[in-house]
Amino acid sequence: MDRASLEDRLWVATFLAAVGSDVLSGVVRYYTSMAGVPQAAYLPKVLMLAWVLLTLVKRPKAGHALIALYMIAQSCVSLSHGVVPQAVAFWVWTVSPMIFALTAPPGALALLNGRIATAGFIVLAALCGIGILANTFMTLPWVGTSVSVGGHNVRVAVSSYVGIASRLSGFGRDSASTGLMAGLLTTWLLMRTDKRWLQCALLAGAGAAIHATTNKTAPVALALVVGAHCLFSTMTMKRACLWATAFAISFPLASFIAASAFNLSGTGYMTLASFQDRMFNTWPVLIEGLLKNNRIWLGLGPGGFGSASTYYESAFGFNVAYADNTVLYALASFGLFGAVALIGFFVRVVLRAQPDDRPSWAMLLYLLFACATTDICESIGCLLFLGLTLAYLRQRALAIEPQAWRVPTPIFATQWRPRVPATHAMPSVNREPLLESAHEGLGRL
């Protein structure tokens, strides 16, 4: 086996550092701000963006130019809606982890399955659980604080509650990102170990950690992935990914139709209050707002929706901070045309991918279940693992792609062999006397 190149090792180190920056987001931001260098917390993102730019320069493709032209056109849509250029740049900064993971070299993808990388993932998963455990018994100093970065007020870690229960964020930025990261790391490690006791320990630890964050998306997605892993074949898991994609698309649309046709508002149950709010308030109001003034066709443009909306004063008349559904997030950002193009690209990758990569299908299934009720585009961990999973699936598809067969062109002139006379023919061939006499007659003509 060839040794990994320095480029592959640097990519893997950057990927692990990026995952670690999300797991330890609160800790890193707090102590870097105390040291007077809060910008140091963004070093992994700077490295990822530098890698993407280097890849575009070293390996340019025609598709890159088309994507760049489309993004320029969409940026013009953003500016026409009153979005400032800083918001557009911040949106590119936000999604850079996914682009970084999509440009992973094949050697780095193989290196991520090695022992050193696996040990790194185990350490990060342990830190994720330890942070939540520590937050259970004590108040961490970075929770609820904020720092100033470039003149903007940035929250170090969010302090929130569900009723009287505190949503624990651990060492991370908030409870949602911590819960999703715990599920991502558990899914990654679960599919790479055959020891049952270790799998049970992973699931028990992840279940306890996610329960403390009060996040509902992560445990449901993880439970469905574990059930699919135990009951389904790999080909069935691939089909389940397609069904999960359809569910993520149709679920908010169905809630919009139901909310428009019936009066479904109500208090509901406290444990499902946030989910009920998505179905009867967030999704219908967002779709209705996009339908007004025909914004649904081109969307608000990159930077007009999501966390980048804090850079400008919104005059759209509806909430542009979150969608709680990744498909609606894409619809609000790029419109119907852009969302259909993104979904088409995603479905094409899924259909062309081979069904034998079980770990990738399990990770993709987790992300698809999560994207049905979460903006995974706002989570560094989800963006990293989504891009990484698509990179694995694309690599396996390209590895077995049939090559066009061509007739080899001879370098020198072809030397034709002299025709073997009939007397030297193989004696085992039976000859018909009638046919031989006919051939002799034709030869005399």
Image (cartoon, rainbow, N blue to C red):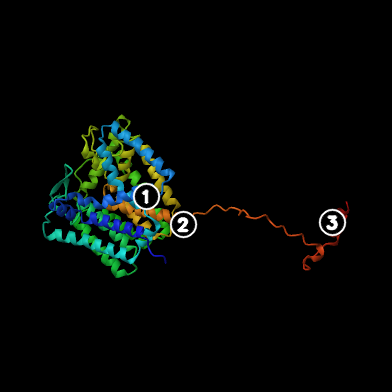
Asked whether disc 1 touches disc 2, contact meaning CB atoms under 8 Å apart, the reply is: no
Q: Residues within 10 Å of mark 1 (few under 14, many from 20)?
A: some
Of the residues shown, which amino acid type is indicated by label 3? Answer: His
Q: Secondary structure at mark 2?
A: helix
Give the mark, 3 or 2, whose residue is nearer the N terminus. 2
Q: State the CA–CA distance, disc 3 to disc 2.
A: 54 Å
Camera sees residue 285? no
Task: Identify the residue at image location x=15%, y=61%.
Answer: 134
Q: State the CA–CA distance, disc 1 to disc 3.
A: 69 Å
Disc 1 target residue: 55
Q: Is residue 229 above or below residue 371?
A: below
- Name the foreground residue: 180 vs 228: 180
Mark nearer the viewer, 1 or 2? 1
Of the residues shown, which amino acid type is indicated by label 2? Answer: Ala
Residue 87 position within the rendered picture, expressed as x and y whole percent measured from the top left:
25, 39
Q: Secondary structure at mark 3?
A: helix
Q: Secondary structure at mark 1?
A: helix
Q: Quadrant of the N terminus?
A: bottom left
Q: Is residue 19 above or below residue 198?
A: above
Residue 419 position within the rendered picture, expressed as x and y whole percent measured from the top left:
77, 59
Task: Identify the residue at image location x=35%, y=39%.
Answer: 71
Residue 198 position within the rendered picture, expressed as x and y whole percent measured from the top left:
29, 68
Give the mark, 1 or 2, whose residue is nearer the N terminus. 1
Disc 3 target residue: 439
Q: Quadrant of residue 109?
A: bottom left
Of the residues shown, which amino acid type is indicated by label 1? Answer: Thr
